[in-house]
Amino acid sequence: MTAAIASSMAITTQRPRRWRQSCLPWLYLAPVVTTFILWIYWPLIDAFRLSFYQWDMLPTTPITYVGWKNYANIFTLPKFWLALKNTGIYILGLLPLAVLLPLAIALFTADLPARARNWYRAVIFLPMIVSPVVAAAIWRWLLDPGHGMANIILKMLGFGSVRFLQDPKIAIWTIIVLTGWKLIGFSTLILSAANANINPALIEAARMDGASRWNIVCDIRLPLLSSTILFLVMMTILLGAQWSFSYINVLTAGGPLGSTTNIYYLLWDFGFSSLSVGWSSAAAVILFIGFGAIAFLLFRLIDRYSFHDN
């Protein structure tokens, strides 16, 4: 009888302890989960709800239910298709600057002396530290068609003045170059860290077998860097429109003639310039669904084509 009572008391004391142990991880995760719900998932759900309404965000204005009308209007808007086309141009233009050029820099500076390598990386990473708004203001002065330093240098070389931000055919490429200029340092840092993480024994074994530097790059470094390269490609595709927003907003405001407007700037323009929260929310939902599908495909490609030495 005494043994039964003791065993039952032991079980009752173990239950609260097990309950505390099972709940403790959730308590640690509670701040992060709460932050995600309040700042990501709830705004996403609210944007989906508002996409079916017409409202100008004024407290005194009634919210009118319009159903799928906002989506239908956006898909029939020429500005939307132009912004979608420009988004594709941004992505294609940023891929060499955000992936290929940093990859070349990371590979061909890996064998430099430590002091020189650190100096090169510090200089390349410097644009990433500068605020986008401050950088855009400086570039506005440098690219001024009348008195900018860029045009002064071109005139000294015998070329004519170039309207970098005023010509519809050149403005979008100017924004792409400025955005890529800021991203080169970040991508170079990521690729340099991944390159330094490669097992040195593989490189030494290849050199002992007579492999040239180019053979080592093609047969060892690039395959082992494939997951990092695909990650940067995914980041550029998914976030390229967002990264260029500051330069578009400060330098061109989507112009001239909408030539620099992308899908991310368009939904901001609907919400804060036109004060059409329904159109802005509908554009945000379209953006989320489209890039969500692209992200799913890219994750599948990363899982399939990534190569690891372990």
Image (spheres, helix red, strand yellow):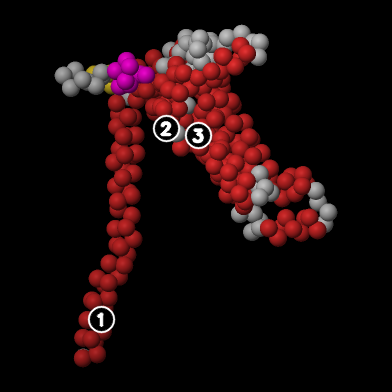
**Element marked by disc 1:** helix
Mark 3 sits on what residue? 127
Give x and y (percent) for residue 118. 58, 46
Report the span colored magenta: 269-277
User: Extreme right residue here?
Assistant: 210
User: Extreme bottom residue here?
Assistant: 2
Query: Label 3 to label 1, Cα distance in Å?
Result: 63 Å
Q: Residues within 10 Å of mark 1 (few under 14, many from 20)?
A: few
Which amino acid type corresponds to the residue marked 1 in the rendered image?
Ala
Q: Residues within 10 Å of mark 2 (few under 14, many from 20)?
A: few
Q: Which mark is residue 10?
A: 1
Query: Label 2 to label 1, Cα distance in Å?
Result: 61 Å
Q: Nearer the viewer, mark 2 or mark 1?
A: 2
Which amino acid type corresponds to the residue marked 3 in the rendered image?
Pro
Q: Are marks 3 and 1 in contact (CB under 8 Å)?
A: no
Q: Residues within 10 Å of mark 3 (few under 14, many from 20)?
A: many
**Element marked by disc 3:** helix
Query: Label 3 to label 2, Cα distance in Å?
Result: 8 Å
Dot 2 or dot 1, earlier in sequence: 1
Q: Nearer the viewer, mark 3 or mark 1?
A: 3
- Figure disc tally: 3
Residue 18 visible in the shown view: yes
Give x and y (percent) for residue 178. 52, 26
Residue ID at (34%, 44%): 36
